[in-house]
Structures are given as structure tokens and as C-alpha cells.
Image (tube, grey):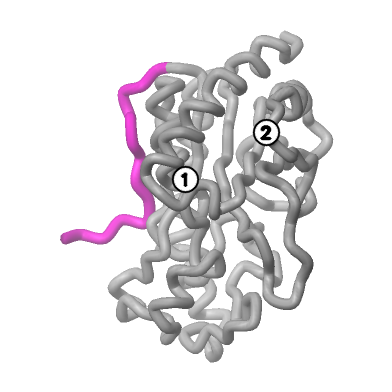
């Protein structure tokens, strides 16, 4: 089977939404031997991908009638949600785990991975984002409840944004109105890294955007992923209606 660094679900869907999942899979491409030398248990952890995020993205895309862009390489191969000059683009140590396959990756190997995986993903992203003048980008991610040696994170869901919070602000309000949710603004991470995917395809073009972080133990089954996709869709539609024209 021919390897592709990304997959697009719902290419014929016509709504103004675009759903992206930068860390959809823990795939290590065949030309890297299919492995980075980590254990299977480590490759199933949040260090390798965003568990549950792909299923939520697919359910959300179906509910909104939107195309869904999914990466097909582990964030440990090269991270599509970092700028090309970001020092964390190619990680050699992550949450206590050394990445053997990255230990000796030099500048030439970094450039090769950019060209083979990262840049094709972003080329597809830009084509999809440019399909509508009024596009609204929703990036779906997941986070682990507790990093090694760190406090437990209290949030069920976080909404991340930079200076353009036109879509994020009403979405946060809608989520906060849900009685069973603890919602974080720019939690568990800061909402902007220069050159990250939303910066590159949303902020720099003035496109509506938001990034949703779901705690991964809440989306660890196909049923819970479908549930969250269906739950988020009407809240996003409500939020978009409140964005000034």
C-alpha cells in the first residue's frame, strides 16, 4: 500500500467549516522502518499522537458537513503543529521517554522529514483552508490528564486561541454553560506558538479559527468520540453565529 502523509475525509463536503487533526495517528512511515525504537506502550501514549482526537474529528466533520484533514505520521516523526524553526519540531526526549530514532537525527534528516511529511500536510491544509472566503477552522487535539511528576489537570476541555478570539470566545461561553464541564481558556497549554498550524493557516490570513483540547480519558472509545463530536457540533454552530461579520 502506498504511504501518504495525510488523509482527507469528506472531500465533497461544502460547509464553511474545516476540521483538522494535526496529531491524528502514531504512524511511523515505512522509510523510517516503521519504528522510532520506542516500545509499543510508549507509541500508544500521548507523546506519539493525540489519543481519541481522530475519532472526534471524524464525528465532528460528519456532523458539520465539513472536510476533515488528518495527519498520518506521529508527532515524534516531526510535529506538524510547530513552526519549521521551532526547537520542539523534532523531539529527542518527551515526558520522560527518550526517542531512540531521533537521537542522531541531524539537520539533513530534519529537512528530509519536513519535505516528506510536514510540507505535504501543510500544502493540503492550505488548499482546504483557501476553499472558502469565510472558512472557519477547528483544530481538534487531546491532552493527558497528568504528565509524569506533574499535578492532575482539572479541565475536561480547553479552548486555545491567540489574539483572534472571535470564534473562541463564544465557544468558551457555550461550553461554560454546560453544567458538567470544567473549561480552560488557553489550558492546558498557551494558545499560540509562532508558526504553529493555526498561526500559519488561520491567524496570518485573518480566518476564523479555534483549537479544542479534550482530555483523552474522556474520548478513549469510539462511542465517546462520537458523543463528543455530536456534542461539540451545535456549540460550534452557535458560536459561529455570534462572530461579527
Q: In which quarter of the image is residue 235?
A: top right
Is label 1 or label 2 in front?
2
Is residue 99 toward the left or the right of residue 172 in the image? left
Residue 177 point in image, percent of width and height:
74, 23
Residue farthest toward the left in the current orientation of the protein: 1
Residue 237 point in image, percent of width and height:
58, 16
Quadrant for the C terminus, please: top right
Evaluate whether residue 176 shows in this view.
Answer: yes
Q: At x 32% / y 76%, what residue is drawn?
A: 34
Is the Cβ of the residue at disc 1 closer than 8 Å to that at disc 2? no
Residue 28 point in image, percent of width and height:
37, 70
Q: Quadrant of residue 44?
A: bottom left
Using the image, tell me which numbered label, if any, was put on residue 180: 2
**Going from the N terminus, do you reach mark 1 or mark 2 first?**
1
SS label for mark 2: loop
Using the image, tell me which numbered label, if any, was put on residue 210: none
Pick whichever, 144 or 32, lies toward us: 144
Q: In which quarter of the image is residue 103?
A: bottom right
Is residue 46 toward the left or the right of residue 96 in the image? left
Is residue 131 toward the left or the right of residue 98 in the image? left
Is residue 165 toward the left or the right of residue 70 in the image? right
Quadrant for the N terminus, please: bottom left
Pick whichever, 196 or 23, lies toward us: 23
Write down the region rendered in magenta: 1-14
Residue 153 point in image, percent of width and height:
74, 57
Pick whichever, 242 or 137, lies toward us: 242
Q: In the rendered structure, does residue 7 fall within the stretch colored magenta?
A: yes
Pick whichever, 148 or 50, lies toward us: 148
Q: Disc 1 designates what residue? A: 123
Please rate how many residues cluster around mark 1, counting C-alpha atoms within 10 Å: few if below 14, some from 14 to 19, many from 20: few
Evaluate whether residue 128 shows in this view.
Answer: no
Amino acid at each position: 500500500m502506498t504511504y501518504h502523509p495525510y488523509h482527507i475525509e469528506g472531500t465533497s463536503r461544502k460547509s464553511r467549516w474545516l476540521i483538522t487533526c494535526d496529531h491524528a495517528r502514531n504512524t511511523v512511515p515505512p522509510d523510517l522502518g516503521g519504528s522510532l525504537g520506542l516500545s509499543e506502550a510508549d507509541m500508544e501514549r500521548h507523546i506519539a499522537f493525540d489519543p481519541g482526537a481522530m475519532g472526534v474529528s471524524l464525528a465532528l466533520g460528519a456532523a458539520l458537513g465539513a472536510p476533515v484533514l488528518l495527519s498520518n505520521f506521529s508527532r515524534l516523526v516531526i510535529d506538524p503543529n510547530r513552526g519549521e524553526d521551532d526547537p520542539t519540531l523534532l523531539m529527542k526526549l518527551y515526558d520522560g521517554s527518550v526517542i531512540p530514532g531521533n537521537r542522531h537525527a541531524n539537520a539533513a534528516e530534519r529537512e528530509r522529514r519536513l519535505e516528506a511529511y510536514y510540507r505535504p500536510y501543510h500544502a493540503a491544509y492550505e488548499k482546504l483552508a483557501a476553499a472558502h472566503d469565510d472558512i472557519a477552522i477547528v483544530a481538534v487535539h487531546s491532552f493527558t490528564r497528568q504528565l509524569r511528576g506533574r499535578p492532575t489537570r482539572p479541565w475536561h476541555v480547553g479552548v486555545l486561541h491567540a489574539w483572534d478570539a472571535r470564534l473562541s470566545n463564544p465557544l468558551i461561553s457555550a461550553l461554560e454553560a454546560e453544567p458538567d464541564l470544567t473549561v480552560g481558556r488557553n489550558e492546558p497549554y498557551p494558545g499560540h506558538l509562532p508558526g504553529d498550524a493555526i498561526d500559519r493557516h488561520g491567524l496570518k490570513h485573518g480566518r476564523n479559527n479555534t483549537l479544542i483540547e479534550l482530555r483523552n480519558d474522556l474520548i478513549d472509545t469510539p462511542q465517546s468520540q462520537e458523543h463528543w463530536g455530536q456534542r461539540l457540533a451545535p456549540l460550534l454552530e452557535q458560536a459561529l453565529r455570534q462572530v461579527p461579520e
